[in-house]
Amino acid sequence: MVKPGVWVVDDDDSTRAYLWDFLSSRGYDVQCLDSGEQVIRRLASAQRPSLLILDIHMPHVGGLEVLAQMDKLGRRIPAIVLSGIDQVSTVVRAMRLGASDYLLKPLDEKELELAIEKVLEEHGNGDSLDLELPTPETAFPSSNKRMLQIKAICDHVAYTDVPVLILGESGAGKEVLARYLHTQSGRNEMFVKVNCAALPTELLESELFGHERGAFTGALREKPGKFELAGQGTIMLDEIAEMSPLLQAKLLHVLQDGEYSRLGGTKTLRSEARLIAATNKRLHNLVATGEFREDLYFRLNVITIEVPPLRERPEDIGPLCERFVEKYRAKYKSNVKRLPEELQHAFARFSWPGNVRQLENAVKRFLILPDLQLTLAELRESGSQRDIAPQGSFSLKELSSMAAERAEKELILRTLDEVNWNRKLAARRLNICYKSLLNKLRRWQLRGRSEVTANRDVSEDVYTISATGSRN
């Protein structure tokens, strides 16, 4: 299978030739450009790539100017910027303009390969998007009373700088809500998201606060953290319940004093970013068992918003479907303008254990492959508590397929647990392609161990709305 398209943009002939050989040998569809002007001209007319590898320093229009132009045009293309100069201020500026990663010349092949895999994985295998900022219509396509109450509270607190704690099941829309708060806040700087469950403690500390050169093995250069990159913008700490006690203490210090230091550093830095924390767990229960610091919980729990699961707001399913069809039909070159009535009724009766994210994926699937029976079978196989068809309607073939799917899922999850959710190692043990493993996890709505726990406990872990400033 051909890998995503990559544009290599560098005025140096030898760098372009090296990157063309490197990427082509790994199956990427590579185009080489020698100036920033060519990128800007192509943005409006050519099929945009899945990834840019972009030199910072080029004559006339450099990498920073290209990133600024893309931001101005509302084009979001994952970008890795390259430079021969190790300047943290340049890194910070590039990242605030939308770069996904930053590498120094001469390039290390292993570092480059890992950076490309990470960026494409984070951006859904490199699908480039137009920048879509949440508006009241897109963030709240809802007539549900509780969702409208949440919108009113978000509008009221958006301009404040107090922390916001967002609770809710996986896929319910916590990140959309956080981005809406950022958009309504009037903050002109970045929205930065960090998944606290995706990295071990040592790497998460470096990701949040940055590190100095030599701070640990492999720290070959200084690196700014997400708090530094966020500036006066917003930083969202997703799955904050997974954060270790050590990092909880350091985060508490940031919330109390607005100060922190990089890993291995002595210089005090200040944070002016607005903090939004999110989790699918009940933090007050973790406080009671000593798994989460009580003082940090009280610091975070100034404004608490609990997003109800989709099964508790079925009136939102129709408007959400309409929005997803409108959003994706052009991207997937689909002729579908409206979902069939039978599918709409099935969606309305389904319990959506994966919430809005699962509904979005179901709509995408139908737009790509508009086969009604296949989509209905996919819903049945996902194990809803409110089936869309009677149990007796399953064929022997369908039952066999469902049993095989469950067995495969259990084997993969058990292997992931054994290797501490190192997905590359798990893929090798299972003797399957790494990308195939990622696709299966996406199909099952699983991105980390915390979501596995949430999905296993979905029948007993029902959230209700408590959109007040009270402490639970």
Image (cartoon, rainbow, N blue to C red):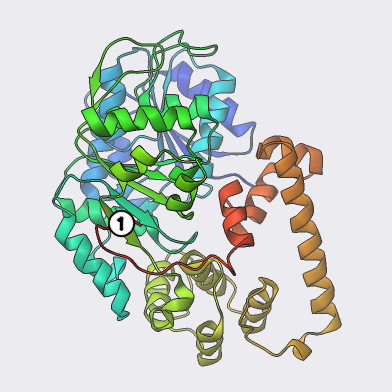
Residue 293 located left or right of residue 448: left
Q: Position of residue 296 (x, y in %)?
A: 35, 39
Task: Note whether 7 is above or below 162 in the view shown.
Answer: above
Q: Which residue is depicted at the point 31% across and 53% down?
A: 178
Q: Nearer the viewer, residue 296 or 430?
A: 296
- Number of numbered discs on residues: 1
User: Which quadrant of the structure image shows residue 256?
Assistant: top left
Task: Note whether 35 is above or below 310 in the view shown.
Answer: above
Q: Residue type at mark 1?
A: Thr
Q: Nearer the viewer, residue 366 or 239?
A: 239
Quadrant housing the C terminus: bottom left
The residue where tag 1 is placed is 304
Q: Which residue is depicted at the point 50% across and 71% down?
A: 359
The crowd level at tag 1 (other Cα within 10 Å; few <14, some 14-19, many 20+) is: many
Residue 234 located left or right of residue 320: left
Q: Position of residue 48 (x, y in %)?
A: 40, 48
Task: Note whether 282 is above or below 300 in the view shown.
Answer: below
Q: Position of residue 205 (x, y in %)?
A: 44, 26
Task: Note whether 342 is above or below 194 in the view shown.
Answer: below
Residue 309 located left or right of residue 43: right
Q: Which residue is depicted at the point 58% across and 78% down?
A: 370
Residue 433 in sight: no
